[in-house]
Image (cartoon, rainbow, N blue to C red):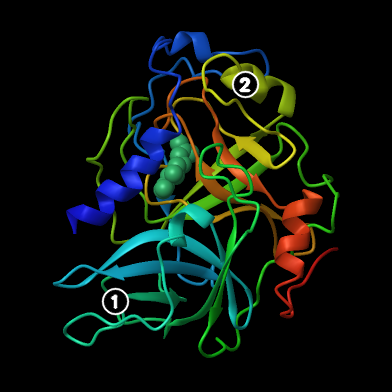
Amino acid sequence: MARVRRRVARMAAWSVTGLLIVAGVAAATAVGVPSAPKALRPIPRIVGGADAPAGVFPFMAALQQWEGDGYLTICGGTLIAPDEVLTAAHCVDQWAVGQATAGGQPRERVIVGRTVLSSGDGSVRLPEAIRVDPTWDSATETDDAAVLQLDAPVGGVSTPTLPVSGNRGYERPGAPAVTVGWGSTQPQGPTDVGGGVYPDELRQVSLPLVGDGPCQGVFDGKRNPALFPKVMLCAGGDGHHDACTGDSGGPLLTALAGGGWELIGITSWGNGCAVPGTPGVFTRLSAPEIHDFVATSGGSVAFGP
Ligand code: ARG
């Protein structure tokens, strides 16, 4: 169990390469990034989220790996077509199709429609094909996207729509977005590796979107390489609410006026978790190169409105 957690944690730690020198958290505060509220929050944990009621995120997927004595949820994902789950490239780059453990269990699996991990709810599927964005670069975390083709469709789930290519209309700075996941509920310093507290219950948190300029200001000179806003979108930064280790691959969503959700991002990386002045970073789904990658998967993914 620890092995995978360590691997996920390594990703999180990697993303702060270059920050170790500037360790000052205050240095990350930039104009336009929400500052920490003055009043102390009663529960300053992950990310300050709340339980996600069953049925609100029916498209949410848990990506699991067999760890000898059971399955460990390593990442999130989003059902974007009945037989396709969108996730982060760094979640599944080690996955392989058709691998079984010594005991005969599938090495990796995907669950859609489960809120409480320990329950038997939802549909269990196996990846039949794994498509990692061919331009994903683990060194810079650019184009952190992958599509899992499931071995059988999951029926009856209303999936979120994705932005049409180049449409940043859902990314107004300050607008609220929501991210969900089973990742760690504990804040984490920029240099912390490992640890974390992992909930059984799916958690949700609302995060204001952060403009490209301010977000670039946070990471420029502190992370090397810095942020690439063309394919990365920032949200949060108040020091109380954030995604964290284990949330990777999960959705960043905005609620549509007419009901339903627009999927605007994939949880990708951060500098610690809930560090004041430091937003979380998400793969930008409106970016033409990311859009094209998702669209060429050939499935019935809905773009729009
Ligand atoms: N890379 C992390 C993972 O593998 C997700 C990091 C998100 N961190 C954040 N502070 N928003 O789960």
Name the side, left or right, on which 293 lies relative to 42: right
| Callout 2 amino acid | Val
Q: Quadrant of residue 58?
A: bottom right
Residue at image x 32%, y 43%? 9
Indicate yes or no: mark 1 CB to ligand 1 under 8 Å. Answer: no
Indicate yes or no: mark 2 CB to ligand 1 under 8 Å. Answer: no
Q: Which mark is residue 47?
A: none
Q: Earlier in the sequence, mark 2 or mark 1?
A: 2
Name the foreground residue: 59 vs 15: 15
Name the foreground residue: 263 vs 23: 23
The kind of secondary structure element at disc 2 is: loop
Name the foreground residue: 7 vs 269: 7
Q: How many marks?
A: 2
| Callout 1 amino acid | Ser
Q: Which mark is residue 33?
A: 2
Residue 145 vertical position relative to residue 86 in the rendered view, above or below: above
- The x and y percentages for residue 12 are 39, 39
Image quarter for ligand 1 equals top left
Q: Which mark is residue 119?
A: 1
Residue at image x 79%, y 63%? 258
Q: Where, quadrant-wise, is the N terminus in this rendering?
A: bottom left
Can see residue 49?
no
Residue at image x 57%, y 38%? 281
